[in-house]
Amino acid sequence: MVESKIMASTIQNKKTDLLLWAVFLIGIFLRFLPGLLAGFPLNDGGMFLSMIRDLRSHHFLLPQFTTYNYSEIPFAYPPLGMYIAVFVSAVFHVSEIDILRWLPALISGAIIPVFYWLSALILHSKSKAVIATALYAFLPGSFDWLVMGGGLTRSFGILFSLLAFYYVYQLFHDGSGKQIFLSILFSALAVLSHPEVGLQTAVICFLIWLLFGRSLTGLKNAMLVALGTMLLTTPWWLTVLLQHGLAPFESAVQTGVRETLLASLFHSIFSTQGGLPILPIFSLAGMIVFIRKREFLLPVWAILPFFVDPRNAPAVAIFPLVMLAGEGLYYLKEEFDRAYLKSMQKSGKINAPAWLTNGIFTVLLFYFLIVSYSSTGSLVRLSLAVSDRETMEWIKENTPAESRFLLVTNAGQISPMTDSYQEWFPVLAERKNQNTLQGQEWTLGPQFYPYSQQLVALQACPSVDCLHEWVARNSVEFDFLLFQKRRASPGFIMSLRTDERYRVIYESESAVVFTADQ
């Protein structure tokens, strides 16, 4: 009897391990697929391409400013991702463009097993951790922001942040020297990877200490981690302070859009996957389970990031929400098994219908897989098309180097910070774009959000008269106007064609460029 139980347990463990490896492999494939189809980095990353080249040209020393968009933007961004890109490019002879296309997907794939280890540690169950990991690996939208070109910094930030949580959690449970060192290392790497993720990491580590480390030893260990992290990150922040003072950091912390807190929180907790509120149901069930057990780490972790930085919170909160979903799904399965056994006792059946609950979980994962695969097209469409790159190459070869452009690339329906055309233009065309917003978070401070609204207003202009009013109001000078045809207002383009002050110098199926005689 004992031997049969051991054998059954061994078989079940092998099945679980097989499922886990399948989840890893399929999850990694999903993260590489959009870049494979796009043929170019997804969505953003143009500013990072400039910064990678700046580091290379400065022999790995931090320059005072980045050359991006010729705007004297302080090189204050945490540089670890760019350093790794320069190193990979130099050692393996890979172009920076290809690095921005593939490295974010690779690191995003590496997050999956790290998330499994963290889930197993916090949920105290391999089965629950496998469920949570499968949900995360296949969950539509869970990795989009990490596999884009700008995911070069975001993916590293999230990876090191999860590793920091893993070792900080262990630190405040056993307090070994090894855990202190690894907590310092990965906390520092998270800070050096991404500004907002670094801030979120500090706050969640403080939460872990508050829940599990409130003792003299815990306080000592927390202070060691904080001091060690500060020392390891000194080469970056001290260089920025010596070159620019506190100004870039003061500017960056004022650019968050606080008005989005409730909207961001509601959207993340009650998001739908393919039109179905699957994650909210399981996450709320898991939250109830944890609160009933008086275990508050995951429920608080799921909400706290929205009060720290609403703009970046969904990328951090997704992990506790998925862990809660794993707990909730496991709890609902157990309750179903109990109810089924109770109802079938009269018929003499004593085994729960494992095939049924396992089948439901399999169908759920298959549904997520289909939706994630289908959403690949949306990610690919965010990437610059070949025709877009050809337009920028023509501008690079046929306009004066000191030319100033205004770009009209949508009808005011896209945030300036998520418009790939706007971001990539300065680095591919090597011309200044007067309405690129990327990088201005380090210079504009409280004016960042009002300025972004002005850029949206420009995109929404219906005619040349609106353009002239906008230019006068914002004191902007330009030499050329570029319209992306598929997104800009046709009426706006037509009004310039009939205006004697403007002349078409380039036109293709995707874009039209006007000279501006001001």
Image (cartoon, grey):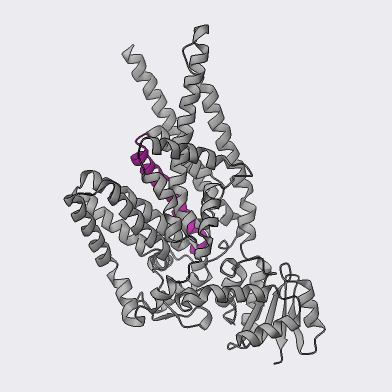
Q: In the image, is residue 155 above or below residue 389?
A: above
Q: Is residue 323 magenta?
A: no
Q: Which of 242/443 is in front?
A: 443
| Residue 391 in view (yes/no) | no
Residue at the outermost bottom position: 518
Tell me where residue 124 appears, x and y as whole percent.
Answer: 34, 36
Residue at the outermost left position: 216
The residue depicted at 29 percent of the width and 72 percent of the height is 235
Task: Report the magenta stretch's main SS.
Answer: helix
Q: Which image quarter holds the N terminus?
A: top left
The residue depicted at 80 percent of the width and 86 percent of the height is 499
| Residue 463 in view (yes/no) | yes
The residue depicted at 51 percent of the width and 53 percent of the height is 265
Q: Which of 159/443 is in front?
A: 443
Q: Which of 266/29 is in front?
A: 266
Q: Is residue 102 magenta?
A: yes
Residue at the outermost right position: 498
The residue depicted at 39 percent of the width and 19 percent of the height is 8
Q: Which of 334/125 is in front?
A: 334
Query: What range is drawn magenta here?
Result: 98-125
Q: In the image, is residue 307 above or below residue 21?
A: below
